[in-house]
Amino acid sequence: MEAYGLTALPNARVHLPEPATEHAVALWHTQDYLDVLKAANGGAVPEHAARCGLGPGDNPVFPGLWDAARLCAGGSLLAAELVASGKATRAFHFAGGLHHALPGRASGFCYVNDAVLAILYLKSRGLRVLYVDIDAHHGDGVQHAFYEDPEVLTISTHERGDYLFPGTGFVEEVGAGAALGYSVNLPLEPFTDASVYLAAFEEVVPPLVGAFKPDVVVAQLGIDSHRTDPLTHLDLDVQGFARAVARLVELSPRLVALGGGGYDLANVARAWTAAWAAMNGIELAAELPASFAEDARRYRFRGPTLWDPPEPPAGAKRLRAEAYVQRQVEALRRLVFPIHHL
């Protein structure tokens, strides 16, 4: 971002967040869980850690865990405050988007669910919130938080749960009670590429945005959907990701954008640079700036450009992905669209 000049735009500002207060985090997370996170801050595994999802694997204990979790939450709350107050129409906290954390349990590299906290803050300001999650993993924690809340519409596009963590996010998960139809899931077959993804996105997201009429959109912009991500099996490129973000910008009256998954650092840097450019209406040169050459080598960029090279058509895999996602779109039209008078 710095190399492209995106952090010094005339109408853009870089803000340094303060850690969220314990009170702010406790608006959704249980106090027992927060006590365990605080006890883990020194780096030693506390009592009841395993019960709270902490330990070897996805959610290790490390020195400064509680401090880091509060800082992450503070960044998303700051982004929400800037947008809610009218100081900004768009804000991007790319260290946020930890969408798996549950009220009393860490999950999937996520300790505190900053996305939920940001949405709760926006709701407290009287705003109607749409959450759109384009991470390769289902946004299960956010769905859980608002599954019975008709004031928040959640949409998650992700690799299908029978192939990928967290094993949820099927099209039949549509909300409950008064919020029936307010939880929307578009699962994707492995090897779904940008052309298949963007076509399905267009069939689902814009109609629901138009029907729901949000005051603000909270978007989780994970880039683990990329074809070279080591943990997932989708087939998007940076260009396709950037087009999805640009479409979200067009659809959003106000936008709080968060980061999310992405386990290839070169993809993360390129994708979130492209995302911030899209939020500012800037078209970037394909060739990476010369000032970034040393960093590009250090982070093992595969080439000298922001964009990915063309990839040969996937043939049968693409056809299978296209057929699968079309079935999901048709199911949403049956299960969800009528509730929104579509």
Image: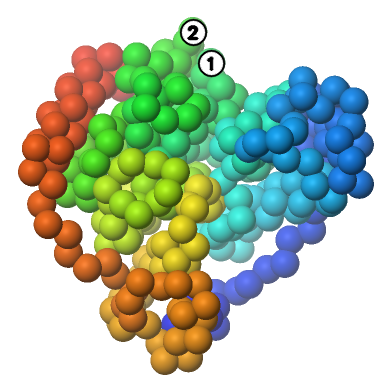
Is 130 situated above or below 293? above
Q: In the rendered image, which residue does mark 1 sit on?
A: 148
Q: Earlier in the sequence, mark 1 or mark 2?
A: 1
Q: In the rendered image, which residue does mark 2 sit on?
A: 177
Query: Looking at the image, which is closer to me, 257 or 290?
Result: 290
For marks 1 and 2, give the CA distance: 6 Å
Q: Quadrant of the C terminus?
A: top left
User: Residue at 37% across / 22% down in the picture?
Assistant: 162
Q: Give the percent coordinates (x, y) of residue 173.
A: 40, 16
Q: Amino acid at mark 2?
A: Gly
Q: Secondary structure at mark 1?
A: loop
User: Residue at 89% across / 40% down in the picture?
Assistant: 44
- On the picture, is 328 further left or further right than 141? left
Q: Amino acid at mark 1?
A: Glu
Residue 171 image-quadrant placement = top left
- On the picture, is 102 further left or further right than 27? left
User: Residue at 87% across / 45% down in the picture?
Assistant: 43
Residue 30, labelled with which disc? none
